[in-house]
Image (cartoon, rainbow, N blue to C red):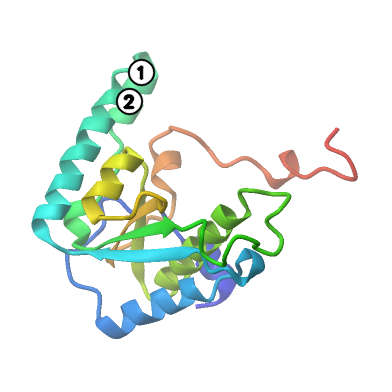
Amino acid sequence: MDLYDAINRRRDTRAEFTGEPVAPEVLERLLSAAHAAPSVGMSQPWDFVLVRDADRLERFHAHVATERETFAATLSGERAETFSRIKIEGIRESGLGIVVGYDPTRGGPNVLGRHAIADAGLYSVVCAIQNLWLAATAEGLGVGWVSFYREEFLRDLVGMPEGVRPVAWLCVGPVADLPDVPDLERFGWRHRSPLSTVVHEETFG
């Protein structure tokens, strides 16, 4: 798949997972793509926890369902109705969760390039996630980034040390298909804005 095709074909997958396992050699390619991401000071501050245990998947699913209801309770009217139609996770259906962590101690106390921008290491982890996501798209797999969770719950669930921050739970697996239009656009939650609305020349104004 052409790089630009993968970028435009990438979707936040929710309802399309088939439940089939990811082949070991494919998973190795995805993780290698993630590990090849650029990182501030070559610190490579990411970790990947692979979660397949049914009980652990179920526990995370229950936690996410609770957080989903917490958010839903803040909505009313059209927003509530629209949100009720959006499936927000495929935790059990995908059968594989990849928890991506950020270790700010990786690379030692003097990470080249991080002295002025404390979050540069976190940005590096997000680059690794995007690499994994594009590689998965090229492999014909789906990825869903679950955001309805509390960090401390996820840290405890997968045994991350106190100093390591869980940045993402990614549902990863084969899919029946990827929709042409992203779910949030298809259901009317938000629509993609034109490029011209976010490009500025010389100064923001």
Which of these two is toward me, 34 or 111? 111
Residue 36's mark? Answer: none
Q: Is residue 73 left or right of residue 189?
A: left
The residue sitting at 33% across, 29% down in the picture is 83
Q: Quadrant of residue 177?
A: bottom left
Q: Point out the residue furthest to the front here.
A: 109
Task: Tell me, yes or no, whether the two marked residues, 1 and 2, touch with CB atoms within 8 Å.
Answer: yes
Q: Point out the residue furthest to the top here.
A: 77
Q: Give how far across and how far down residue 73 sits, in percent.
A: 29, 18
Q: Which residue is mark 2?
A: 71
Q: Give how far across and how far down residue 178 sits, in percent.
A: 36, 60
Q: Secondary structure at mark 1?
A: loop
Tag 2: amino acid: Phe
How far is disc 1 from disc 2 in space, using C-alphas?
Answer: 7 Å
Which of these two is toward me, 70 or 45? 45
Q: Give how far across and how far down residue 8 sits, in percent.
A: 53, 61
> Few, some or many C-alpha atoms within 10 Å of disc 1 (few <14, some 14-19, many ≥20)?
few
Q: Secondary structure at mark 2?
A: helix
Residue 75's mark? Answer: 1
Q: Is residue 22 above or below residue 54?
A: below
Residue 178 is at least partly visible in this image:
no
Q: Is residue 164 above or below residue 96?
A: above
Which of these two is toward me, 81 or 88? 88
How many dots with numbers? 2
